[in-house]
């Protein structure tokens, strides 16, 4: 499907839009470098494992490593969380030491983001990603906030409210125009990652809360594509099948499903739905000029119910952050950091104090990313 045809088919904001119904996306996917490389690499889940390994190294030399021979990157978050409150004080001390060092790195990275023009006057930062889904992640976030406040920073840092697996789906609601919520009670959402692809049926609960604060994932399906090593076309085919399955479930359960699919995807998302960069961990070449995921999905799912399918795709960090829109109405400017394979990032400015998706007067204006390549 040609790009021009895609834009006409969706009839909503551009993919990767700067202007969304409730917020302006001031920046996303900023890549800041220092003398050691990309700054985000210092506050990723891999960075934490490297720090943990450094603390184990001197103990390993004396045969006193409480973790034995198990590689640091194979120790589960659940195990590390249990050690924090367990009876093995030496093991607990190692984990606490790693948390402290990682918090220092997270504080440093946050400080550098706040110095960029795009992040100026940020009042609050929510932290998501898989690392947040652990006690050690929550402690690292809290410690990083304390470090920053000790330096007289007024920034608030907090873990994202929804489970990270659900935040990337619930956030897709805030990509949608308001007409969806007046006539439908649910949408389809997709969260694409370097390891998994997750699809969900998201109930808006709009009649209970027009700011979408009561929204919830009622059905979801996870595919760990990294285990299957599919081709790009194979991945799209599997994703299409997953979405069709959710359409059938929605009909069976009596949901009034909107003809809308919101997609969270890694990388810099262009207005036509192509991916400029940052999709290197996805199966196959998703950055090819000949590949367009929204167009491919519309070919596979041209209609939902009796209406043409509308699709909007945005960066995964942006979409995860959007899940916080209803809860960020006491500040004007806020950001999100997602700690995973890398460090996702996005900064937002609220467009309406009520934070709802009631009347998006400007939501059909096609935003144009002006800071996607912003570098310090």
Image (tube, rainbow, N blue to C red):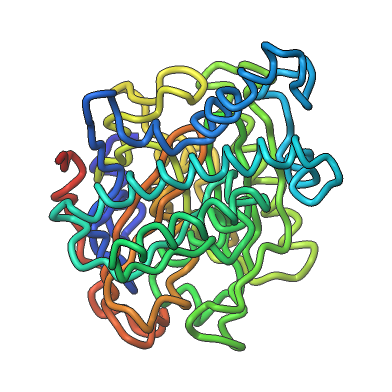
With 166 as the anchor, is 64 left or right in this view?
Answer: right
- Name the quarter where the C terminus is drawn: top left
Relative to 7, say whether 23 is above or below. Answer: below
With 30 as the anchor, is 168 left or right in this view?
Answer: right
Relative to 355, say whether 315 is above or below. Answer: above
Residue nearest the viewer, comparing 87 with 155: 87
Please name the residue shown 76% across and 20% down the image: 64
Spot occupied by residue 241 in the image (x, y as percentages of width and height): 66, 37
Residue 252 in view: yes
Spot occupied by residue 11 in the image (x, y as percentages of width and height): 31, 59
Spot occupied by residue 281 in the image (x, y as percentages of width and height): 47, 24
Question: Residue 239's image quarter?
Answer: top right
Spot occupied by residue 272 in the image (x, y as percentages of width and height): 27, 42
With 283 as the anchor, is 346 left or right in this view?
Answer: left
Residue nearest the viewer, comparing 323 with 15: 323
Relative to 114, say whether 99 is above or below. Answer: above
Please name the residue shown 74% across and 22% down the image: 65
Please name the residue shown 61% across and 18% down the image: 57
Residue nearest the viewer, comparing 118 with 305: 118
Residue 236 in view: no
- Name the quarter where the N terminus is drawn: top left
């Amino acid at each position: 499907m040609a790009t021009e045809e895609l834009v006409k088919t969706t009839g909503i904001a551009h993919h990767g839009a700067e202007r969304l119904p409730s917020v302006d996306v001031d920046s996303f996917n900023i890549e800041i470098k220092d003398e050691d490389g990309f700054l985000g690499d210092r506050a990723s889940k891999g960075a934490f494992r490297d720090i943990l390994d450094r603390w184990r190294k001197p103990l390993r030399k004396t045969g006193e490593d409480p973790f034995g021979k198990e590689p640091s990157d194979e120790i589960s978050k659940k195990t590390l969380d249990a050690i924090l409150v367990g009876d093995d004080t030496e093991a607990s001390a190692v984990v606490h030491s790693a948390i402290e060092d990682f918090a220092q790195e997270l504080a440093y990275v946050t400080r550098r983001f706040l110095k960029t023009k795009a992040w100026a006057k940020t009042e609050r930062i929510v932290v998501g990603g898989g690392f947040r889904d652990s006690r050690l992640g929550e402690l690292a976030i809290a410690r990083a906030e304390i470090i920053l406040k000790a330096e007289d920073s007024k920034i608030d840092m907090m873990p994202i409210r929804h489970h990270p697996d659900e935040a990337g789906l619930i956030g897709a609601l805030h990509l949608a125009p308001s007409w969806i919520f007046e006539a439908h009670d649910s949408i389809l959402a997709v969260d694409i990652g370097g390891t998994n692809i997750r699809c969900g049926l998201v109930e808006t609960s709009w009649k209970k809360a027009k700011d979408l604060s009561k929204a919830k994932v009622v059905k979801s399906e996870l595919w760990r594509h990294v285990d299957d090593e599919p081709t790009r076309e194979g991945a799209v085919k599997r994703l299409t099948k997953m979405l069709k399955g959710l359409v059938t479930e929605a009909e069976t359960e009596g949901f009034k499903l909107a003809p809308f699919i919101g997609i969270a995807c890694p990388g810099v998302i262009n207005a036509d739905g192509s991916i400029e960069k940052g999709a290197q961990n996805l199966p196959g070449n998703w950055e090819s000029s000949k590949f367009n995921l929204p167009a491919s999905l519309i070919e596979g799912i041209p209609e939902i119910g009796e209406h043409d399918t509308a699709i909007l795709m945005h960066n995964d960090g942006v979409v995860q952050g959007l899940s916080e829109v209803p809860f960020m109405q006491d500040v004007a400017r806020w950001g999100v950091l997602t700690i995973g394979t890398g460090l996702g990032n996005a900064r937002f400015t609220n467009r309406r104090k009520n934070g709802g998706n009631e009347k998006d007067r400007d939501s059909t204006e096609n935003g144009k990313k002006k800071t996607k390549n912003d570098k310090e």
